[in-house]
Image (cartoon, grey):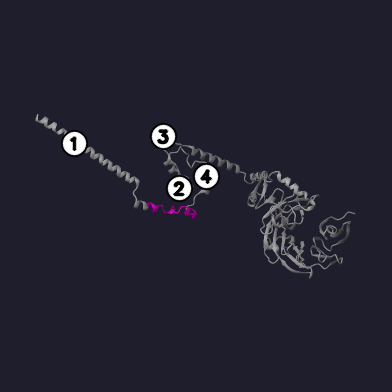
Amino acid sequence: MSLPAACLMQILSEDYSKAAFLCQDRSIQFHAKYGMHYSTRVPSFGRDLAYAPFSADLLVVGSTPQVLNLAEGRFLSPLPAKSPGINACGISQVHGLFGCAGDNGVLECFDLRKRTSIGTLNAAAAAGVADAELTAVRFDDSGLHCAVGTSNGLVALYDLRSSRPLLVKDHMYGDKITDIKFHSAHGSSGNTGRKVVSSDSHIVKIWDEQTGINFTNIEPQEAGINDICLWKDSGLAMLACDAPKIQAYFIPALGPAPRWCSFLESLTEELEATDAPAVYDDYRFVTKAELDSLGLNHLIGTSLMRAYMHGYFVDNRLWHKARSLAEPFAYDTYRQQRIQQKLEDERKSRIGLVKKLPKVNRKMAAEALLQQAADEVPAGAETSNKKRKVLPSVLEDDRFKAMFQDPSFAVDEAADEYKFHHPNAGNQRQSKKLLAEHFEGLEDEEEEDAGAEEEQDDEAEGSAGSEGDLDDSPDQHSKVSA
């Protein structure tokens, strides 16, 4: 006789001695150390189950929350839920509140002592996705916070005293959230505090409860994550995937290794000594808008897309193929740009008689050219034996030419920061006017000095000519007398 396949399991004791299995044939099997102890049928198909140890109630949710009291050994009347179907459930171990995640996006909480609903919240609508279903729910150890997961990959963290979410985390895969856990980190690297561990079928995200910042991600080789188990106050995590073996991961920054597997500490020390290759060497990072332009948005959620921050990592070969299909004339455009750039470089290399100022930072370029022209030695001037080294133009220097070509380096003289560093930049006309009123230019003084010297030279030549005439006059008189 073949046993029905079990889809969910719930531990009923502190150890593994007592467990309940929810099977696909609408039955519940109770197991002890020696094997199956008892099996019973559920009135309706179950999607999730939870156990309340303080009242010995085993709750199976589906179309309605069914209550099986293990102390009496019989089904009690189902809880009056308002949702047409319930996908997941959870019980707080602090105050005993029983939460049901409905397929209409409503979170409904029950008090098992009164067996009545004490409050409802449209958690999906408050998180920004009104048409999504709730697929996971979990209470933390303090009893004040509750996290719910939606069918489109969002995790919303709520305070039970408020109807607005504290944080909303996106898994970026668009797949339903399968499980949520709260974990206290006690890592050796100072990574302390409470973490939220949420998983879908592709990835496990561990993030901070207060800020929502990612701590780390786990992506198993075998896709299809069904559940995650974390050892309390440690860094050991085990994943139940669509594979025969359980995937085990040890994260030292999350906590120490358990006592029964302390050898993991020495293994991690050996792995830290070896350099591991980068995971995303052959991948290209693209945003959601780029995916839409390339026509690859239908691959979100598959193994070809790796969600990271605000975008995805895509294989370089796939990116090049998609780009060639989306932009078939991209190479021709690139080729024309390269040809145009080479032609412009050739024009610049020709000898030009007129120096044209660039379009970017024209004033700065003019000042630099004037300064360079002033520093150069004139052609007819005498030079020493050591020839003066001619420096290249600032506009052609590889270190500075981008400042006169790239508009992003343009100096905004109207900016407050520029005016702060150049307080006299706006008073150039006024300064020139004041200089003209109170000072004389050096060129005017040189012209006056040169005019005075010319007048003195003319007077000296005139006096010399008159003396020559007086010297010649006695000879003439003598000649006349003779």
Callout 3 amino acid: Ser
Q: Amino acid at mark 2?
A: Lys
| Among the two numbered marks 3 and 2 on one chain, the one whose residue lies closer to the N terminus | 2
User: Residues under labels 1 and 4: Cα distance?
Assistant: 72 Å
- Which residue is the extreme one toward the left? 481
Residue in view at x 53 percent, y 49 percent = 408
- Residue ID for mark 4: 402
Residue under the point 67% across and 48% down: 313
Residue 177 x, y percent position in the rendering: 73, 57
| Nearer to us in this view, 33 or 360 | 33
Find the distance from the CA under tag 2 to the CA under tag 1. 61 Å
Q: Is residue 198 above or below residue 346?
A: below
Q: Which residue is mark 3?
A: 384
Report crowding for label 3: few under 14, some 14 to 19, many 20 or more residues within 10 A (C-alpha). Answer: few
Task: Tell me where the magenta segment starts and ends, as one range.
Answer: 414-432
Instruction: Say which amino acid is labelled 1.
Output: Glu
Label 3 – label 4 distance at C-alpha: 36 Å
Q: Amino acid at mark 4?
A: Ala
Which of the image's four quarters has the N terminus?
A: bottom right
The residue wearing badge 2 is 363
